[in-house]
Amino acid sequence: MYTEITIPAFCDRVLGFSVPESTTVWAMSRQGLHKIELGLKTTVETNPTHAEDYEIFDTESNILDYKGKRHLMLGENGGEPILQSTVRHTLRRGPLGTVSARGESWETFDVLGADGKVVQQLRFPDTSGDWCYATFSEDGRYVVIGVPHRLYAYCRIDR
């Protein structure tokens, strides 16, 4: 099962976010380059000198090249998420635009087991109607979902 990890709000619009490497996610926004460390106490560090910095973020290849390291990005310019984890879970987009009784728009990604059956549904609010990506981390421990105004993260808890 995956449990949600709270990522604090850090910008007004995410332009792109990286496929997580271990516990680190990078995000580019109009406010800066953000380093997000996932964990029990998730932290966000912002470097405002790299706001919308297309010298380090190539939107054609969706590569962030920062301090000599290249990171695969997902966001408004597309990208290639990791949709199958190391434990043979698969991510699949759920039905679009589920509306709650309070009029909130919710989206879902289903986590499928090796047998193709839904083992968990990850629900998150999204009012943008714009791009939306979900990806496993390289090691399969995390799922990160990105929409233009927010990132959501989930950690796999083995029982």
Image (cartoon, rainbow, N blue to C red):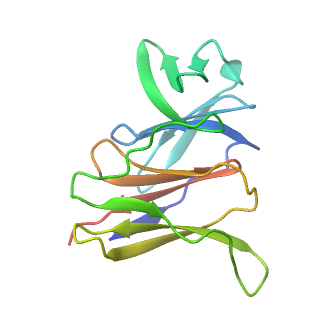
141 above or below 124?
above
Q: Quadrant of the N terminus?
A: bottom left
Please indicate whether residue 139 sits to the left or right of residue 135 in the image: left
Instruction: Specify the quadrant of the image occupied by residue 139.
Output: top left
Q: Quadrant of the C terminus?
A: bottom left
Q: Residue at x 51, y 33 (%)?
A: 73
Residue lying farthest to the bottom in this orientation: 101
Q: Residue at x 22, y 51 (%)?
A: 86
Please indicate whether residue 13 sits to the left or right of residue 59 in the image: right
Horizontal and vertical percent position of residue 10: 67, 44
Which of the two residues, 31 or 117, is positioned nearer the viewer here?
117
Which of the two residues, 1 or 118, is positioned nearer the viewer here?
118
**For the image shown, how many numbered marks are present on the structure?**
0
Q: Residue at x 40, y 59 (%)?
A: 91
Horizontal and vertical percent position of residue 47: 63, 25
Horizontal and vertical percent position of residue 19: 44, 39
Horizontal and vertical percent position of residue 51: 71, 24
Please indicate whether residue 95 sits to the left or right of residue 91 in the image: right
90 above or below 13?
below
Q: Residue at x 37, y 53 (%)?
A: 142
